[in-house]
Image (tube, helix red, strand yellow):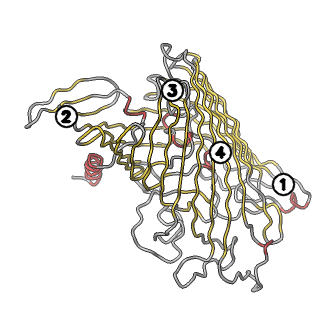
Amino acid sequence: MSKLSKLVLAATCAGLMAAPVFAQDKDDKGNFVIERGGQEAKPTTATKLDKVLGWETSDGKFKLKLENRVQFRFTGNNEVANGGKGSDGRDFMNFRVRRFKTTFSGHIFDKDFQYKATIAWTNSAGQLVESAVFTWAAHELLNISGGQDKTPFSWEEMTSSGRQSFVDRSVTNGYFSQGFAKGIWLGGAFKGDSAVWVKYTAGVFNGVLRGNGDFRNQDLATTSDTFKANAVNAGTGNTGSGGVDSDLMFTLRVETHPLGEVAMDMVDIRGEDKFDKPLFAVGLGLLWFGSDLLNNDFRPNATTAAASGRSQASQDTLAWTMDAHFRWHGLAVNIEFHWRHTEFHYQGRQVGKNGALLRKNLRPTNLDEMGLSADVSYFILPKTFNVGLRYSMVNGEDFEFNNVDGNALLPDATEIGLVVGYYVQGHNLKLQMDISYVDYQLATFRTGAPREPVAGLALPNRSAISRANDNADHLALWQMRLQLQWIF
């Protein structure tokens, strides 16, 4: 048996045993093929429903749904420098398989014991297991889940990449999304006759620093129960020793859907029999986590650890997001606002790079960053032909560093986009093309690793000449993407 065959066989077996979906997973409402197996090895019969493959035992105690999602994409980038500094030559055209994911979901022993496991075959970091969740759906008001899944924080990030109005998510989401997390969480909903008055998720997770200059969570990799010195960013696949840090992340997300539940989707894909009913929802997400960090630009000699092996520099991040969503007659409006506050803490004798005691104006003490995104789309032909517009912006706080002003962890950015989509079979088979213009205002010096959402785009720093003349440098990017998606 080839290595690939063994890998596929192992993934299939893992999916059958892996952990369940959250009770409100919209995918469970989709159609699928059911094979009903008789007891004592009796012959099975298949009932074809449509579109997705699945099996269920005759007693209804076990169910497996298998779904594959593939996104094949063409990208054309045209970079345009604007000002005294910038890059104007990193243009390219490229075909690639952007995503290929397999999801196993269903229930075991009882419909209350639900599971979901997703394998991301194209994950560039080599972390194949994207989610693995088990849920005890004890009551409509209380579901208990554990495992690894997307952090329950912001609507756009929580919405599947297969249900976006554009080819992919916004620049704002690229800076403020909180990635995947491992932990335990509670969820449920208080419903009326047609309204969902309160829908909530509250949990505690590993708070894994995404990067030493990127104060978001990302917890995809397997992390062992071993403490290691300076275990910063452990298990993200980027920087760090791979050890365990004791800090945790706490999240709360609350939504209300007073006219009926709005599906977690970025478009209004309801048919003519349903789309005349207006729907809207409002959500609020809160998140806090702290961690050590290793960044000599924030705290010179930060790698000098205490006797315990822990770094003498740390951060606390408080983030919140508020979003609103409206659906009516094929019109979908999605608006999100993000805000993030990060404070830095330093222990021990703070010695600067020149040997003198570190002065306050040589490093930032806290940062406030914000972002806004708005996606509006409309089905000109119900469930078939869709057009959309996007506006997205990011405002990163400038700070003084080494007595030089104009530094930032992330550049200010503005994104304007247009999309057209042809939905052959809803999201299960669709073709989309979008054209976006993204403008980055460059910072004097960006402390920490670059984290632009556009792959391969490392922004230069603001030029000394423009800084001396109090002028801003910009880098503009024109991007065209054509994507075919099929789900089976």
Identify the image quadrant of residue 317. bottom right
Q: Report helix, strand or loop for mark 1.
A: loop
Estimate how packed mark 1 is, as few (under 14), some (14 to 19) or many (20 or more) residues with alpha carbons within 10 Å: some
Mark 2 or 4, closer to the camera: 2
- Residue highlighted by disc 1: 84
User: Residue sitting at 25 percent across and 42 percent down?
Assistant: 108
Q: Nearer the viewer, residue 379 or 229?
A: 229
User: Residue sitting at 60 percent across and 69 percent down?
Assistant: 293
The label shown at residue 65 is none
Mark 1 or 4, closer to the camera: 4
The label shown at residue 57 is 2
Q: CA distance from mark 1 to mark 3?
A: 55 Å
Mark 3 or mark 2: name the one nearer the start of the chain: 2
Which residue type carries mark 4? Thr
Q: Report helix, strand or loop for mark 3.
A: loop
- Residue highlighted by disc 3: 195
Which residue type carries mark 2? Thr
Which residue type carries mark 3? Ala
Q: Nearer the viewer, residue 459 or 357?
A: 357
User: Residue sitting at 58 percent across and 57 percent down?
Assistant: 288
Q: Nearer the viewer, residue 92 or 300?
A: 300
Q: Give the left or right position of residue 12, taking residue 383 as reference.
A: left
Mark 2 or mark 4: name the one nearer the start of the chain: 2
Q: CA distance from mark 3 to mark 4?
A: 30 Å
Confirm or deny contact between disc 2 and disc 1 (CB under 8 A): no
Q: CA distance from mark 2 to mark 1?
A: 68 Å
The label shown at residue 172 is 4
Confirm or deny contact between disc 1 and disc 3 (CB under 8 A): no
